[in-house]
Image (cartoon, rainbow, N blue to C red):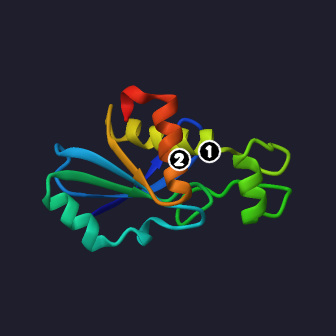
Amino acid sequence: MTEALASLPTGIDIAYETFGDPGADPLLLVMGLGGPMTWWDPDLCRLLAERGFLVIRFDNRDVGRSSRIPSTTPLSKKTLLQAFAGDRSHASYTLDDMAGDAFGLLDHLGIERAHVTGVSMGGMIAQTMAIARPHRV
């Protein structure tokens, strides 16, 4: 397991960990709303790595050791969900921005294409990635 920080061109820092051979087939794990990367069980990550994947788990923005985004509106699940539904008046970013962070992390790692899976909101981010850039997922 290797933990590091990716400084993206957008100014966002994304904390991440990798498990397995850097030359293996990449698998990006995306956690849900407010969940840190550590919610992906390390035993699961190691098992997937043993099965031939380079496993990448990361903290979304505003979670764990990744960048915090300043906001004049108090952050709550309600305001985040409203923003993800398209109401930009309450949130500083959208699912598209979070998918961009995930692509930025892959770019930082030199990965052109990856398997992507997510839990809850992480699944929404994964779907957004697949819609935006299907050739990369």
Does residue 136 lie above or below 99 as drawn? above
Please report the residue visible at 25 percent of the width from the left and 73 percent of the height from the top: 43
Q: Say which quadrant the N terminus sits in.
A: bottom left
Q: Is residue 8 visible?
A: no
Image side of residue 121 versus residue 78, left or right: left
Callout 2: SS: helix
Asked if disc 1 and disc 2 are in contact, CB closer than 8 Å, the reply is: yes
Horizontally, residue 15 falls left or right of residue 41, namely right
Q: Which residue is mark 1?
A: 95
Q: Is residue 43 left or right of residue 134?
A: left
Give the residue drawn at x 39%, y 51%. Answer: 117
- The quarter of the rendered structure image containing the C terminus is top left
Query: Does residue 132 appear anywhere in the picture?
Result: yes
Q: Which mark is residue 68?
A: none
* Residue situated in front as seen by the camera: 39 or 1: 39
Measured as percent of width and height from the top left, residue 36 is found at 50, 67
The residue lying at 77 percent from left, 62 percent from top is 78
* Residue where numbered disc 2 is placed: 125
* Nearer to us in this view, 31 or 102: 31
